[in-house]
């Protein structure tokens, strides 16, 4: 797994600034007031910092943006990075500011003169998140680990304690990004399951259900998706038991390691991007890592359906009728609408076996959600306002875009089949909504449920403020924060603050 940059906090040592290597960052509010660290750097550079913050370039910066001074006088550093940052910056702004520092520092070590800034931990966390790079299949210098991040702060112990759960979340985000970025010839269903088994090292109970067991359970819609592939279909169950005897929260992820569309084959252009069609499973894996890594005082079970959708003489065809684990029959109109066939069986299994307090499924499910929301927000569908609001609050706190979409019985008309209980697609109108309506049929009465369509946010071509181009790890931090609402009060103030949302 790609490892986030090492983050450390130490007391402010102004005498050490001249010899600090790499990039030295100072925080300056819009009005240009220099704190003690910035004043020392200004003296070392013979007034260069003061000239910079009085310049038109600094005035044009938005909060969270950086002005770089290259090769400063009387300092060993390669650059001084002036981050425009209010003294009372919120979490999202602090994360973006830290990410801007990471983008500006290149591969050099980063020293942040945060002093008494209350968001020092968040700034360091943002820098760590943005420092990701996927280089497993490159040679040479690209494989070098990320350089360390050091923050000089007024209270190093308090900053380190605040950052500890963020460090766990960063590891989870990096795991999700690695999984989504992996090519399909490497991340087969078998290799995916093997990597998830490594979560046992963190205390997660991991169980891999093979095809014979899935057949016995009646997961025929899931198995139908993978029957044209040489890679065996699997379901991996990850159970974190940190909260006593309470029922768990269930996270369910679509894990289509590659999606050709099957017999309803996709166009060749852009098909290489379908290595990311397991993004929902990647997010669930990352969230489980983060939850276990910080020792969450909650019970959470993650379940992922791992399949490959390939065209073959054994592949399912348009017009086939398959029976789900629930017992409902589905007419397959389009074999490229396979994710919902995977999810519906795993969702039903999760409810039967674990009787969770709530269930969240994640999937790169529809292109329609990208048409509606672009790459800024995931689509959020839910049958429970309070449960949905809990997630939306967590997403807002982490700066992860999420927008609630409608559900309604009228959309069910589009899913009616002449020969089966339902069709797997409802046509072009409201495509993401009818997909959610399909999944809702596999949610038991009284079960709080959220469906997250992450097709537009799991992987992006131009990067985001907190991630380079490629996999984003969207949802890991929001789900981790949501889980805090299920933790016992003694788990910490953050858990208590979110409880009962």
Image: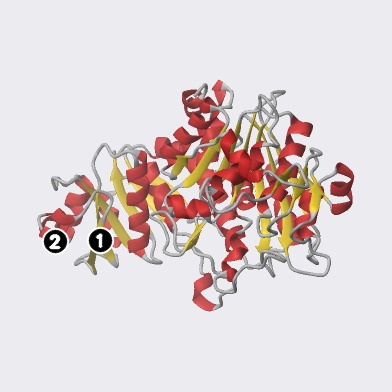
Question: Separation of disc 2 and disc 1 at Cα?
Answer: 10 Å
Q: Nearer the viewer, residue 350 or 85?
A: 350
Q: What secondary structure is found at the residue carrying circle 1?
A: strand
Q: Nearer the viewer, residue 321 or 252?
A: 321
Point out residue 257 in the picture as x, y percentages from the top left corner: 68, 60
Q: What secondary structure is found at the residue carrying circle 2?
A: helix
Q: Which mark is residue 48?
A: 2
Q: Is residue 468 visible?
A: yes
Work out whether 313 lies above or below 496: below
Point out residue 236 in the picture as x, y percentages from the top left corner: 75, 48
Q: Nearer the viewer, residue 277 or 442?
A: 442
Dot 2 surroundings within 10 Å: few (below 14), some, or many (20 or more)? some
Q: Residue at x 36, y 43 (%)?
A: 92
Work out whether 185 lies above or below 452: below
The reply to whether dot 2 and dot 1 touch (C-beta < 8 Å) is yes
Q: Which mark is residue 130?
A: none
Q: Residue at x 57, y 63 (%)?
A: 181
313 relative position to 406: left or right: right
395 relative position to 215: left or right: left
Q: Which mark is residue 80?
A: 1
């Amino acid at each position: 797994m790609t490892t986030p940059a090492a983050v450390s906090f130490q007391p402010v040592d102004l005498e050490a600034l001249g010899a600090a290597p790499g990039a030295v960052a100072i925080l300056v509010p819009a009005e240009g007031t220099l704190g003690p660290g910035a004043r020392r750097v200004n003296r070392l550079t013979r007034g260069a910092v003061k000239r910079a913050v009085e310049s038109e370039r600094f005035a044009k910066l938005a909060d969270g943006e950086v002005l770089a001074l290259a090769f400063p006088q009387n300092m060993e550093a390669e650059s001084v990075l002036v981050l425009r940052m209010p003294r009372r910056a919120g979490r999202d702004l602090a994360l973006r500011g830290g990410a801007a520092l990471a983008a500006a520092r290149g591969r050099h070590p980063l020293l942040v003169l945060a002093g008494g800034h209350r968001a020092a931990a968040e700034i360091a966390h943002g820098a760590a998140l943005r420092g990701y790079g996927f280089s497993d299949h490159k040679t040479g210098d690209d494989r070098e680990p990320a350089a360390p991040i050091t923050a000089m702060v007024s209270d190093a112990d308090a900053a380190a304690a605040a950052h500890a759960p963020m460090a766990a979340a960063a590891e989870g985000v990096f795991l999700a990004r690695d999984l989504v970025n992996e090519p399909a010839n490497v991340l087969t269903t078998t290799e995916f399951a093997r990597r998830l088994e490594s979560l046992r090292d963190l205390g997660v109970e991991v169980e891999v259900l093979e095809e014979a067991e899935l057949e016995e359970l009646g997961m025929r819609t899931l198995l139908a998706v993978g029957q044209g592939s040489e890679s065996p279909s699997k379901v991996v169950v990850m159970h974190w038991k940190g909260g006593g005897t309470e029922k768990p929260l269930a996270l369910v992820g679509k894990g289509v390691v590659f999606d050709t569309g099957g017999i309803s084959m996709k166009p060749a252009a852009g098909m290489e991007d379908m290595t990311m069609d397991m993004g929902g499973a990647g997010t669930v894996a990352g969230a489980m890592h983060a939850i276990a890594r910080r020792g969450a005082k909650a019970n959470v079970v993650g379940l992922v359906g791992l399949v490959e959708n390939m065209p073959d003489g054994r592949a399912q065809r348009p017009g086939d009728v398959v029976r789900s684990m629930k017992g409902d029959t589905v007419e397959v109109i389009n074999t490229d609408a396979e994710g919902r066939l995977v999810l519906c069986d795993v969702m039903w299994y999760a409810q039967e076996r674990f009787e969770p307090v709530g269930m969240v499924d994640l999937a790169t499910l529809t292109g329609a959600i990208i048409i509606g929301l672009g790459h800024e927000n995931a689509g959020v569908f839910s049958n429970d306002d309070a449960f949905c609001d809990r997630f939306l609050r967590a997403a807002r706190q982490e700066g992860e875009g999420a927008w609630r979409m409608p559900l309604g019985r009228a959309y069910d008309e589009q899913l009616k089949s002449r020969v089966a209980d339902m069709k797997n697609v409802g046509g072009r109108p409201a495509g993401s909504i009818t997909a959610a309506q399909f999944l809702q049929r596999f949610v038991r009465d009284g079960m709080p449920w959220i469906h997250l369509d992450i097709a537009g946010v799991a992987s992006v071509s131009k990067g985001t403020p907190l991630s380079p181009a490629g996999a984003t790890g969207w949802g890991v931090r929001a789900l981790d924060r949501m889980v805090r609402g299920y933790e016992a009060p003694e788990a910490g103030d953050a858990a208590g603050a979110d409880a009962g949302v």
